[in-house]
Image (tube, rainbow, N blue to C red):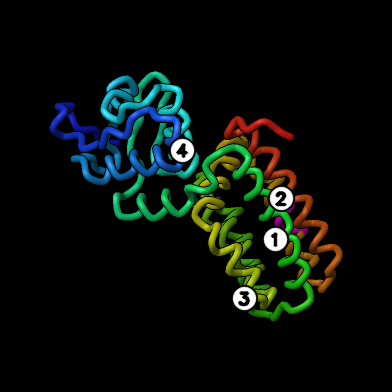
């Protein structure tokens, strides 16, 4: 991954926001993203050292660390212990993704999003079992095949995401599908985190297969139950990966 050698202050365009009480985490995340977007930083480049970044923004290092962890969770930066922080996404996508997800950047809101996904996806699985067409089954099998063939966590996450959206399509409910669609970017990043933390994705593939089997058999109860089991398991692993305390 490339890295620029220059670290002169004139390359950084971070706005001084001040460590004031009214400054929220989404405010600080937005300031970080805007500073990155206006600075001479390209994907793969290293951000300023934590101490200097805190000075440029005028915030405490503990608040800065929380904001950086949020961007890391979103997949926009990569924090390498003992090395530094690197940009991992294009400028054009960063602002939209970070600002759009600003409301979900603290522990309680993350839990709320996970809870929402649990109920939305369980409902979609039940509806998919009721309404699925043959073309929907083909998409599920194609996604499963891609999961099995994946050689890295990013490819696995892409196939996993396609599987879940194939279920949303099969459910034939545009309202629930749109709710899931609004979470696509963040959910994909979470799958990457979970998959990367596993030595073998076999258990996750089996869970997806159980969901697909129930949908194929038009077993509404079985599909919903299998999805609930799957979401509960990935949620547990996600909490471990992002170090979010369980309730």
Q: Is residue 181 visible?
A: yes
Looking at the picture, does residue 98 appear above or below residue 77?
A: below
- The residues bearing labels 3 and 2 have C-alpha atoms spaced at a distance of 21 Å
- Between the C-alphas of marks 1 and 4, the distance is 31 Å
Q: Which residue is mark 1?
A: 121
Residue appearing at x 48%, y 51% in the figure: 101
- The kind of secondary structure element at disc 2 is helix
Q: Is residue 137 left or right of residue 7?
A: right
Disc 3 to disc 4, how far (Cα)? Answer: 34 Å
Distance, label 2 to label 1, CA atoms, is 8 Å
**Residue 236 placement: quadrant:** top right
Mark 4 nearby-residue class (10 Å; few <14, some 14–19, many ≥20): some
First in residue order: circle 3 vs circle 2: 3
**Residue indicated by mark 3:** 174
Q: Single out the mark in the foreground, 4 or 2.
A: 4
Identify the residue under disc 4.
Answer: 24
Q: Residues within 10 Å of mark 2 (few under 14, many from 20)?
A: some
> Disc 2 marks which residue?
231
Magenta span: 206-210
């Amino acid at each position: 991954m490339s890295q620029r050698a220059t670290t002169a202050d004139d390359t950084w365009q971070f706005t001084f926001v001040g460590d004031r009480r009214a400054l929220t985490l989404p405010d600080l995340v937005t300031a970080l993203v805007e500073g990155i977007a206006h600075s001479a930083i390209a994907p793969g480049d290293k951000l300023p050292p934590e101490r200097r970044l805190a000075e440029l923004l005028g915030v405490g290092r503990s608040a800065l660390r929380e904001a950086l962890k949020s961007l890391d969770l979103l997949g926009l930066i990569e924090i390498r212990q003992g090395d530094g922080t690197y940009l991992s996404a294009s400028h054009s996508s960063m602002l939209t993704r970070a600002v759009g997800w600003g409301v979900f950047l603290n522990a309680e809101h993350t839990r709320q999003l996970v809870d929402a996904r649990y109920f939305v996806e369980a409902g979609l699985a039940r509806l998919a079992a009721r309404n699925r067409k043959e073309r929907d089954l083909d998409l599920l099998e194609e996604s499963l095949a891609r999961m099995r063939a994946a050689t890295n966590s990013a490819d696995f996450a892409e196939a996993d995401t396609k599987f879940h959206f194939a279920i949303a399509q099969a459910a034939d409910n545009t309202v629930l599908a749109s709710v899931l669609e609004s979470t696509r970017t963040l959910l994909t990043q979470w799958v990457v985190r979970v998959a990367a933390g596993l030595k073998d994705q076999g258990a996750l593939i089996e869970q997806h297969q159980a969901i697909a089997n129930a949908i194929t058999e038009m077993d509404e109860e079985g599909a919903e139950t299998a999805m609930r089991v799957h979401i509960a398991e990935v949620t547990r692993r996600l909490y471990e990966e992002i170090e979010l305390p369980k309730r």
